[in-house]
Image (cartoon, helix red, strand yellow):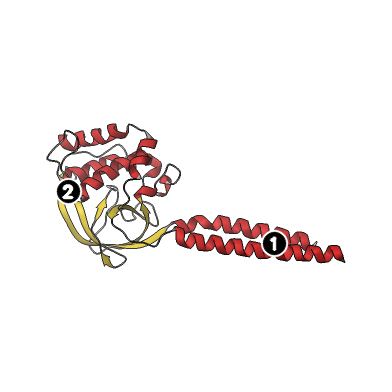
Amino acid sequence: MRIKALGLGAIVALVVLCGGLPAFAQNEVSVQFTGGYTTTWGNSGGNYGAGIYSATINGANSPGIICDDFNDEITSGEKWNAYAYQASSLTSSNIGETLFGSTVGITGYAEVGTLVNMMFNSSTTYGSLTGITQAELSSAIWDITAPGGISGLDAKAQNLVAAVEAAFNGNSSAAQSYLATLTNLWILTPTPLGPGEPQEMWTQGLSVPEGGTPLMYLLLAGVSCFGAMLFNFKNRLRRDISA
């Protein structure tokens, strides 16, 4: 009976280990909006800060953050926690961890990533569209993520949304392949999620601990522990048989 209990304990320990692994794939950071933004965009509802916002991440100055969330608001000096996801790591299986993954999917994030990348690179051209402003980029991003879109987009922003949607055309494989190239972009998904919480942001050049390193240490520790249990189990079995 002791042998069976020991074997069962080893199995349970291994299951608990495996169940705890996914949590180590997340990198939690502290974000603070310091009040600045590069442009404004307005519609009949009012004027909104747009473009690249000034912010600190983990207390250090950042290259800026870009909002993809028109539903929520932040104020100058506001600070919150967020999970940082490298855009290149997004897949159809983990996209649901982001704020809009369950609604716009991986193709929607590829579309937003295209516009965010343009904004950080000060690009004003997409295909045949030229003279694109940061306000138009911001409003196009919000139109993609907001249910039913937003009102007040000018003609160029509307054409920009149509163009990036046509580029992926609902093709999740193409979207994932494109996102895989965005190794310098990170998505900052607020935690906890929900109405009234801070906005989801994008940033670039973020330096965070690699999720795989603690994951590997945990895995090695688990394997070592399981090996020790198994060795002990075999020794007990030999003693019981010889007895």
Q: Residue at position x 36%, y 40% from top?
A: 177
From the image, tell me which residue sits under label 2.
122
Q: CA distance from mark 2 to mark 1?
A: 59 Å
From the image, tell me which residue sits under label 1.
230
Task: Determine which quarter of the picture holds residue 222.
Answer: bottom right
Q: Mark 2 and mark 1 in contact? Answer it, CB < 8 Å.
A: no
Comparing labels 2 and 1, the label whose residue is closer to the camera: 1
Tag 2's secondary structure? loop
Mark closest to the chain's N terminus, 2 or 1: 2
Q: Which residue type carries mark 2?
A: Ser
Residue 233 in percent (x, y) is at 74, 63
- Circle 1 Cα neighbour tier, 10 Å, few/some/many (<14 / 14–19 / ≥20): some
Tag 1's secondary structure? helix
Is 151 located above or below residue 13 in the figure? above
Residue 218 in percent (x, y) is at 53, 62
Residue 214 in percent (x, y) is at 47, 62
